[in-house]
Image: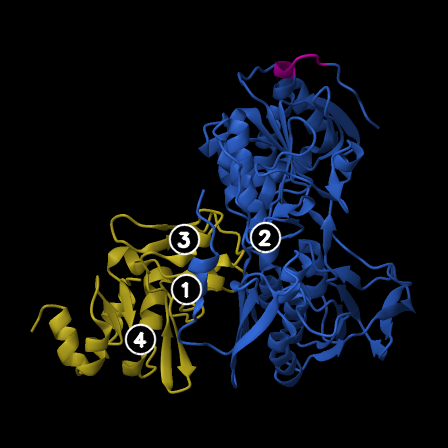
Amino acid sequence: MLVKRGYGTLRDNIPALNFLPRILGKPKHREAKGREGREEGLREAISERVESTTHVLIVGGGIGGIYTALNLIREGVNPHGITVVADEWPPYSRHRLPEALKCGYLGGLELGVAKELVDAGVNVVSPARVVGVDPVSREVIIQYVGKGEEVSYDCLVVATGGKPFIPPIPGIGLRGVTTFYRLNDVRRLLSLRGGSAVVVGGGLVGVAAAISLRRRGLRVALIELKRSLLPQVIDPPLSEPLRKYLTGVEGIKLFLGSRVKKLLGSGRVTAVLTDSGTLSADAVVFATGVRPNSELLLRAGASNVRGAITVDGWGRTSLAGVYALGDCALSKDYITGRATYRPLGFVAAHYAKYVAKAIAGTASGEGTPGVIPTIYERLGEARVYRLGLSASEARSLGLSDAEVEVIKSGDNVWEARILAKGRIVGWELVTIGHEHVIPTATYLKQLLPPKP
Amino acid sequence: MKYLLHVIPEKCDGCMECVYACSIAKHGTPDPLKALIRVERAASGWDIIVCRHCNPAPCIDVCEFNALRVDESTGAVVLNRELCTTCKACMSVCPFEGVWEGCGGAVLKCDLCGGDPACVKACRKGALILSKAPDKGRLLSKSSVDELLRIKGLR
């Protein structure tokens, strides 16, 4: 049920949100008091008044949202004028999930910035989500558990993130089928005691999850639609040694160029039917990529490319006063200047600086020159590095002559430069085991954008 | 690039004193998994894996979270774990693998112990040397004890 609150002015609306951080600071207290406590808090809060010039409403408590809040404070915006609406709190880093699964330790996931923001006076509203936005009257509808509220804003920052893509396969609703995206996914996988797991998706998330599961003693098979591993990260000449390592040393069964047809089982998944045969499975993990979670802005009419919100160099959308960043939005590639979809944490953090400058009024010029990918992952004893573009990403961004030049191809080091239009546009390295010196610096200078 | 901490792996015999000294200095317990310095088998002998505190530092350049900075009093490259999200951009550009992911996903990186690193004091082989700008080639050619004493101004 949605309760509309008919407050006309901005100043009346801010205090209604302001009580929430105090509740958040004491989660146990909130649980004990339940919904009654919340309503009591609302009544108290409405009688308060907070002076603020600009009300910035941030939708999303992930990296894009909280680092925008942090940068706004750095740019001089009053923390009391900033509200973050988050469906879960405190926020945690997805980058740490594979390691958390491997060690069975979930205590280090939380992002330290969260507490600092609350201490500084930022209003955090959680668990809650924004279910509607009217960009003309600059109002949003915030929905809590069981009720809603209409709140106006001066600037709206949409950092709703991504959502895991799950292919429409029969049997997807069976128990034991999970994504590798949320803390609860890791909790579910940690409860497995032996048995076999099938990971669908051979990207960084899928391979990292497969290794973590293997280290927990499970038999692991990995299925990837493309013919090579990490197709979005490195090119085939470098992923081939990784394939050998994963099958030979890690003991993961790989099915490349394979498709999942059906999940079998009654109630709980027991097997995966693929075009390379049937694999028994006590758990199936889908790591099949991320799509923009952008319905809020799509319904409001924001321009987009396949659901990813279009933004300029300052993170401004096509709607006045509305910004978007992170996994729900497009970003600019530094090398080609083209807009592209890169659901990566440092892309969100990069745009968080520009959005904050634009809102704080300290912006001048065109905004960001674009982001250059700086990717690293340790996969067991293998390390994967990439700076700049891979040949396949370069081609998808219009550099049709992009090619891989393998510089080194040894027993445990494989290195390649990516060349396009007569220049270096990227660098890739795979090592098995530790290397004394990594030749990153040579390529870094040619690729890195100037700091804002 | 200039370094504050020099590693001469040729002089390392894998005794792990630096690793234990680091873990004790940081956590009060000798746990190699918690240490901010690692010793690993290399193709020829041993290698010491630790931040060299480069200047200029590529990790600082690429960190979009402003989680890395140079400490003004020591010149060390230090990590603010509160700001870090383990995006691993710093790891992608580190020439020495001097930043890594600890158990549970937090990033581990040497902070130079406020300018007086426990690992350097613990190393009796002269494989770790703290200095503003020594000539590394010269360090390699001399015997370790001689050279260490000279660098420390004792000979």
Residue ID at (59%, 57%): A95
Among the 4 quarters of the image, the one containing residue A271? bottom right
In this rendering, the answer to whether B57 lies above or below A212 is above
**Residue A142 point in image, percent of width and height:** 73, 29
Colour in which chain A is shown?
blue
Q: What's the amino acid at mark 1?
A: Ala
Q: In the displayed structure, would residue A222 be above or below residue A137?
A: below
Q: Chain of mark 1?
A: A
Identify residue type, mark 3: Ile
Secondary element under disc 3, as helix, strand or loop, is helix
Chain letter, colour yellow: B
Say which chain tag 3 marks: B
Q: Residue furthest front?
A: A422
Asked whether B63 or B107 is in front, the reply is: B63
The residue carrying mark 2 is: A336
Q: Is A266 on the left or on the right of B152, as rendered? A: right
The amino acid at mark 4 is: Glu
- Name the residue beneath numbered marker 4: B17
**Residue at horizontal 68 percent and vertical 28 percent from the top:** A37
In the picture, the disc for residue B6 is none
Residue nearest the viewer, comparing A252 with A36? A252
Estimate the x, y position of residue A229 in percent, counting from the top left. Answer: 68, 72
- Is label 4 in contact with label 3 (beta carbons under 8 Å)? no
